[in-house]
């Protein structure tokens, strides 16, 4: 109750603060450039392949407004470890559509957008509002954002099943020019969820002497609220030649007891005017939620029980490379600039307390689970 | 209820004071920059942009969010160097 009250007060505070900010004088802010992107994306790992297109269009109308639209598809096929342990392969599709607009008013930038995400058993609608403003001689940019979303959760094969959840996000961002070669940034975000936060298909594992395997599964039970806070810093540094290094770090905690940190370091190198090459590494580590366990003693052991490996204790590493080739055209031409981009990331996850229940080994002594994944993005961008 | 209104009023007052619609904002926005506009060519280079490719960045954010419990504060601050 106290948490909810704080969220309500904080929400009003942000809206009021944004209104005050918006009504004040400011300096140089610019609308995003007109551009379009067509991307093919692919994720493959843990027996699952998710791929599809993403198309984004952005166009200014006059000098004050820029409209944007994004259409995105996740085509999912295969069977992850959760599914392999108890059921059969599945196939589904998620489509996500976003429409938005950016406005400049008194040189303050405002963004509004609406997103719909749709699956055969899940429907989510969310609204986003943000303001950003440059000050301190255009060397600092402060951004405030607020999002609210509503989810409808269904379960295939159970017509009567319908649950709901609402989500709110409050964000604060500050970027600062430190020198003519360095920009740093700070971000903070509070997210609060309320409602049905389970996955209706996911189960927990418990000891069962009557089962041939020595264990059985039952539906997981999550708390109905979750409030999280995340803080991050980032920096970009321009090297003495046309190249840059960049990095970021984030700390995360939530009311479910999850604590996480991650860090990323990257290097961008250019060859001539046409090539931009990027190499980066990222580390992630998290501690489990209070109600997570790989194996429970009985089906109703605790009020809340989860065996979602994303709520367990684990660490992951990812490393990636990217290449961009750029064509510059005349500024009078229909298309001013175009790029072709290919990006690849390798990821590896090692779980500390999530066991592979499919191995047939002694219950509770199965090998710890781990997997690798490959992520590809290939896209063309044009500026006009 | 009273407490909430009081808290909101204090917070809002602090914002008004901090942003100072009266004259402080003008002073903040007109402050002499220590990196002059003509010194920002490196900062304006796309290789210094946190969000150079928004579609690919949004996709990777989605990939990580789907496989990690952590969420939020993973975008750029939405700022740049004011040099576009």
Image: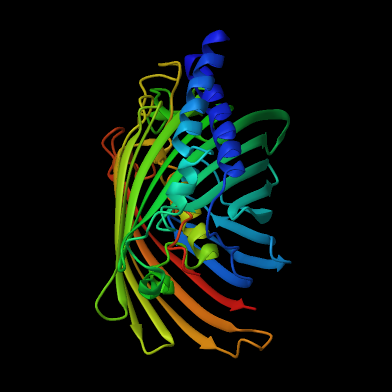
Left or right relative to A262: residue A4 = right
- Residue A305 position, x and y percent, is 43, 24
Q: Where is residue A203 in the image (x, y as percent from the top left)?
A: 49, 32
On the question of residue A111 being in view, the answer is yes
Q: Which of A70 and A44 is in front in this view?
A: A70
Q: Is residue A200 visible?
A: no
**Residue at the extreme top:** B2
How many numbered markers are drawn? 0
Q: In which quarter of the view is residue A176 placed?
A: bottom left
Residue beneath the point at 48% across and 19% down = A3
The answer to whether A193 appears left or right of A345 in the picture is right
Residue B76 vertical position relative to residue A226 in the rendered view, above or below: below
Instruction: Answer with left or right where residue A169 lies relative to residue A324.
Output: right
Q: In which quarter of the image is the C terminus of chain A?
A: bottom right
Q: In this view, does A133 lie above or below A323?
A: above
Coloured how? rainbow
Q: Residue at x 57, y 83 (%)?
A: A337
Place of residue A233 in the rendered image (x, y in percent of width and height, measured from the top left):
33, 49
The relative height of residue B59 versus residue A381 in the rendered view (above or below) is: above
Q: Which of A211 and A25 lies nearest the eye of the viewer?
A: A25
Q: At 24% across and 78% down in the image, what residue appears? A: A240
Where residue A217 appears, as percent x and y from the top left, is: 47, 30
- Of A58 and A342, the residue lying toward us: A58
């Amino acid at each position: 109750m106290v948490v909810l009250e704080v969220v309500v007060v904080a929400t009003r505070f942000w809206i009021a603060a944004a209104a005050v900010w918006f009504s004040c004088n400011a300096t140089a802010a610019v609308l995003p450039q007109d551009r379009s992107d067509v991307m093919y994306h692919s994720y493959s790992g843990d027996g699952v392949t998710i791929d599809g297109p993403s198309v984004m269009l952005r166009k200014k109308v006059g000098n004050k407004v820029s409209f944007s639209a994004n259409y995105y598809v996740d085509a999912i096929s295969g069977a992850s470890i959760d599914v392999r342990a108890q059921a059969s392969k599945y196939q589904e599709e998620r489509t996500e559509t976003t429409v938005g607009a950016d406005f400049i008013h008194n040189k303050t930038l405002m963004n509004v957008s609406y997103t719909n995400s749709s699956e055969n058993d899940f429907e989510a609608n969310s609204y986003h509002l943000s303001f950003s403003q440059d000050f301190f001689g255009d060397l600092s940019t402060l951004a405030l954002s607020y999002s609210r979303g509503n989810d409808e959760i269904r379960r295939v094969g159970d017509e009567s099943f319908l649950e709901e959840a609402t989500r709110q996000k409050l964000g604060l961002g500050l970027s600062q020019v430190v020198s003519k070669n360095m920009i740093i940034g700070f971000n903070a975000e509070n997210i609060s969820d309320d409602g049905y936060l389970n996955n209706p298909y996911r189960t927990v594992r418990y000891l069962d002497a009557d089962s041939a395997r020595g264990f059985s599964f039952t539906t997981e039970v999550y708390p109905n609220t979750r409030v999280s806070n995340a803080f991050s810093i980032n920096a970009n540094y321009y090297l003495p030649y046309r190249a840059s290094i960049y990095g970021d770090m984030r700390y995360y905690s939530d009311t479910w007891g999850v604590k996480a940190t991650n860090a990323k370091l990257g290097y961008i190198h250019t060859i001539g005017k046409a090539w931009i090459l990027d190499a980066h590494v990222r580390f992630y580590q998290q501690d489990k939620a209070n109600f997570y366990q790989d194996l429970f003693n009985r089906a109703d052991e605790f009020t809340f029980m989860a065996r979602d490996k994303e709520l367990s204790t684990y660490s992951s590493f990812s490393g990636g490379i990217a290449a961009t080739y750029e064509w510059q055209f005349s500024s009078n031409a229909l298309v001013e600039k175009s790029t072709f981009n290919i990006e690849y990331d390798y990821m590896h996850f090692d779980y500390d307390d999530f066991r592979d229940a499919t191995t047939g080994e002694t219950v509770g002594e199965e090998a710890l689970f781990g997997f690798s994944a490959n992520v590809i993005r290939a896209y063309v961008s044009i500026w006009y | 209820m009273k407490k909430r209104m009081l808290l909101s009023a204090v917070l809002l007052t602090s914002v008004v004071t901090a942003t100072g619609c009266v004259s402080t904002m003008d002073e903040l926005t007109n402050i002499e920059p220590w990196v002059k506009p003509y010194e920002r060519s490196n900062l304006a280079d796309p290789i210094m942009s946190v969000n150079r490719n928004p579609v690919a960045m949004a996709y990777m954010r989605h990939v990580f969010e789907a496989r990690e419990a952590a969420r939020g504060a993973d975008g750029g601050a939405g700022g740049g160097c004011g040099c576009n």
